[in-house]
Image: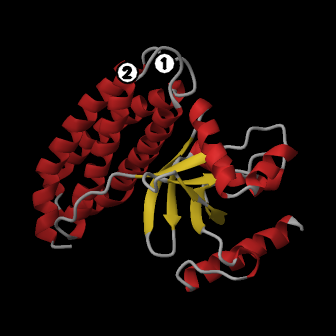
Amino acid sequence: MSFTSFDSFNQSVVEEFRGNAGRVGGPFEGARLLLLTTTGARSGKRHTVPLGFVREEGGGGPLFVVASNLGADRHPAWYHNLLARPLVEVETGTEEYEAVAVPAVGARRAELFAHVVREQPGYGEYQARTAREIPVVGLQRTHEVPAGEGGIAGKLLEVHGWLRAQLALVREEARGGGPGGLGMQLRQHCLAFCHSLEFHHRSEDAGLFPHLEQQHPHMREFFRRVGAEHRVIARLQEELVRVLDGPADGFGGLVERMSRELEAHLDAEEAELLPVLRALGG
């Protein structure tokens, strides 16, 4: 099957899945499927693929997907995507949610893969075809912010709540880390936090703040100050990303500094912006 025809087949499965509340026919009839949407590591474009999934023994915890690529010697494209950009979207047919994709490592991966093979023996056949270790990836739901006020003010609080929760998780993991390199879970959650923070601040600088400044020119100095804070935080974020795949030395200190800078920034921004956004009523 060519790449074009394979992509076309995948797209038809995606459309059938979405049109029938997660049920599909053909070769996948009766299979447990989900849709995973990743962001292209190079292109930045969204890509959705149908994947089989398993649940951990006991039924609790995240869903797991397997980067088998039918036993090929290369990881599938979606796996490379989530290593670069761990924040993904999951559709099960009954719900949709955002998750951080975290590949299992070491003994944990071996334990999960053995469970996968017991549930679906075909994955053992795929592993036998290739020398690469087939990854098992957990899809960990991101922090869900309780429903609050609506409008732009509510959206700002929702995003800020998500950022605070992700940073708290990264900080907790960094404090509990042992010697040597950083763990995969810490790496993936830190990348998800950094990419989301970058997108949020760019959106503010390019869209929200210029719009508000036109209506409230007396706030010009505030927006200049916040923009300068964004640049300071961006440099810290770049440092965090740079050290993620290296030795853990200094990472904990960077996270603590990011926490102080970001918490102070978010608190001050909310104090100034929320009254203005609430007055807009949008």
Q: Which of 193 and 68 is in front in this view?
A: 68
Q: Along the horizontal axis of the image, is 33 left or right of 216?
A: right
Q: Residue at x 38, y 30 (%)?
A: 173
Residue 83 rendering spot, x and y as whole percentages: 60, 43
Q: Does residue 280 appear in the picture of this structure?
A: yes
Instruction: Say above or below: 250 vs 228.
Output: above
Furthest residue in direction right, as rendered: 1
Measure the alpha-carbon separation of dots 2 and 1. 8 Å
Q: What amino acid is labelled 1 in the image?
A: Ala
Residue 66 rendering spot, x and y as whole percentages: 66, 52
Tag 2 and tag 1, C-beta contact below 8 Å: yes
Q: Along the horizontal axis of the image, is 208 left or right of 25?
A: left
- Judging by the rendered image, the residue that carries numbered circle 1 is 248
Residue 144 rendering spot, x and y as whole percentages: 31, 57
Could you say which quadrant of the image residue 259 lies in? top left
Q: Residue at x 22, y 37 (%)?
A: 263
Quadrant in which the C terminus appears: bottom left
SS state under label 1: loop
- Judging by the rendered image, the residue that carries numbered circle 2 is 252
Instruction: Say above or below: 12 vs 196.
Output: below
Q: Along the horizontal axis of the image, is 147 left or right of 130?
A: left
Q: Residue at x 74, y 38 (%)?
A: 133
Residue 28 rendering spot, x and y as whole percentages: 71, 74
Quadrant in which the N terminus appears: bottom right
Q: Residue 117 carries which label?
A: none
